Amino acid sequence: MLEKVRKLLAMAEDPACTAAEAEAFTAKATELIARYGVDRALLAARDPATDPVGDRVVDLLAPYALDKAGLLAAVADALRCRAVRRRSESGFAMHLFGFASDLERVELLFTSLLVQAAHGLAATPVPEGDQPAAFRRSWLAGFAYAVAERLRTAESAAEAAAGTDTSTRDTSVALVLADRSGQVQRRMAEVYPRLRTASARRLAGGGAGHGAEAGRRADLGGTGVHAGTTSELPGRSG
């Protein structure tokens, strides 16, 4: 199914593809990756060895390391994973917790979204009077918010569809997913028993609306490049 997602996104990214065709390919890719997550969860309910709970660390490098962390956390949360942000020598690192299939989805999506965000920022002029770094930070925050909303909508639709599927009528999809979320939370608590919630950021730039619009158009898929590889974003920031 993930291979189908990659092919759909390759067609959506073809310069010869019309806007309407690209939107249709992207919508289908989003639907498939959400279905993949639910399908793997239901399979693991019958055979837990097929999808164990795990974790991985993703390094986030400057520029805009903190903003990349926000995007990764938004994607991880929407796909039923948990993320802990840590400082590192090179910027920030995110320690992700989740089932193997969900971590795979997060890595796939985040890698693609970093590239798309870089392209979107490069194509968006900073309005006169706006400070470039502040504008770009707020743009990235809007982008992450819109992407997370789209992912949650797709996940809810996939869960609802699985709940009405006659082949899964003897399985409570909601209970399966809730149990998985509980296992992920417990795994994270074992490693970080004294976590605290980070303070909310206050962003002064005027790019949130532009970023949110780009997030609503973003392809929610990727090319399979390792998530530790980051695309260079315009400007300089920590």
Image: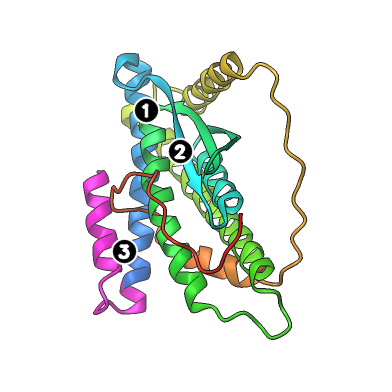
On screen, 193 above or below 11? above
Give the residues drawn in magenta, as a range: 1-21
Find residue 25 and report its horizontal and vertical position in percent: 31, 64
Image quarter where the C terminus lies is bottom right
Q: Say what amino acid the circle numbered 2 marks.
A: Val
Q: Name the residue under label 1.
A: 100
Question: Viewer-proximal residue, 2 or 226?
Answer: 226
Residue in the image at 52% along x and 22% along y: 184
Residue in the image at 25% along x and 62% along y: 10
Residue 132 in view here: yes
* The quadrant where residue 102 appears: top left
| Disc 2 from disc 1: Cα separation | 15 Å
Q: What element carries label 1?
A: helix
Residue in the image at 53% along x and 36% along y: 94
CB atoms of marks 3 and 1 within 8 Å: no
- 202 magenta-colored: no
